[in-house]
Image (spheres, rainbow, N blue to C red):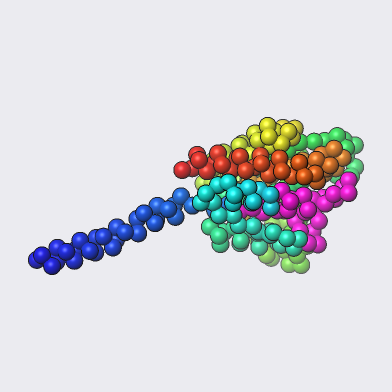
Amino acid sequence: MRNFFFRSLLALSLIASPLPNMRAVATDFTIVLDPGHGGKDHGAIDNSAREKDINLSVARRLGEKLKKKLKGVKVVYTRDDDTFLSLQERAAVANESKGDLFVSIHTNSVDEKNKNRKNVAGASVYVLGLHKDGNNMEVARRENSVIEYEKDFKTKYSGFDPLRDESYIIFEMAQKSNLSRSFSFAEKAQKHLVGVAGRKDRGVHQAGFWVLWATCMPAVLVELDFICNPESAAFMTSEEGVDSMADAIFKAVKEYREECE
Ligand SMILES: [Zn+2]
């Protein structure tokens, strides 16, 4: 009987012992940083700057800050050099790493024909949803159009055609469970891109970005500022600009993580 008692105690302690570790794992936070474009896909190009380079510089700096200043945070990059990745590959990296938050980093632009292109400025952060106006749809179209680099994109992306309006309706129901958390992070990122990095406030919006739809976690897409605006392009390619934009997103991650604990 006594033996049974001790054996039961031992069994209980074995079951109980992983608990402290489990708790340590539970506080871990994996963030997936996704610098948009790369390799043959340059993204927007203007004012001697390339979107893919700006996105990568800011993502790298943000990753460095997170690793250095926040304990228990794991940083996963979809790319950390100048390589081409499909949107599907980006989402696969995020989902396989079981990320707690996905941050896709981009640089905005408007069409060559737009007369306001040298003056348009400011940051905006997007979460998944049906666009409420044409401007947001244009941004999503531009960022989704990387799909066209792939030969059989229509089969691979389940009939999703970035050039057709109807394709965006499928986004409406997707990612519902993560939407409020995505919004919570988006609002923090937007606040600091304005307050810390001094960007003009273009607000938080919803639009149908394929990469946000395909990731199973709270997810946002940041448009840092406009590369077609010479002043904004100079800021985004400067050491000070890269650092302050990374700092803005870092502060948002820090606050978001505290809120989730
Ligand atoms: Zn982009």
User: Which residue is drawn at the image coordinates 75% and 56% (left, top)?
Assistant: 37
Q: Nearer the viewer, residue 192 or 136?
A: 192
User: Which residue is drawn at the image coordinates 46% and 43% (left, top)?
Assistant: 261
Q: Is residue 238 left or right of residue 182?
A: right
Q: Nearer the viewer, residue 39 or 236?
A: 236
Q: Is residue 35 magenta?
A: yes
Q: Which quadrant is the N terminus positioned in?
A: bottom left
User: Which residue is drawn at the image coordinates 71% and 48% (left, top)?
Assistant: 58
Spot occupied by residue 164 in the image (x, y as percentages of width and height): 75, 51
Spot occupied by residue 50 in the image (x, y as percentages of width and height): 83, 51
15 up-or-down from 237: above or below: below
Q: Is residue 116 left or right of residue 168?
A: right
Q: Is residue 9 left or right of residue 224?
A: left
Spot occupied by residue 79 in the image (x, y as percentages of width and height): 69, 59
Outermost left residue: 1
151 up-or-down from 253: above or below: below
Spot occupied by residue 244 in the image (x, y as percentages of width and height): 71, 40
Q: How many marks?
A: 0
Magenta residues, start to end = 32-59
User: Which residue is drawn at the image coordinates 77% and 54% (left, top)?
Assistant: 52
The reply to whether residue 44 is in sight is yes
Q: Is residue 241 magenta?
A: no
The reply to whether residue 202 is in sight is no
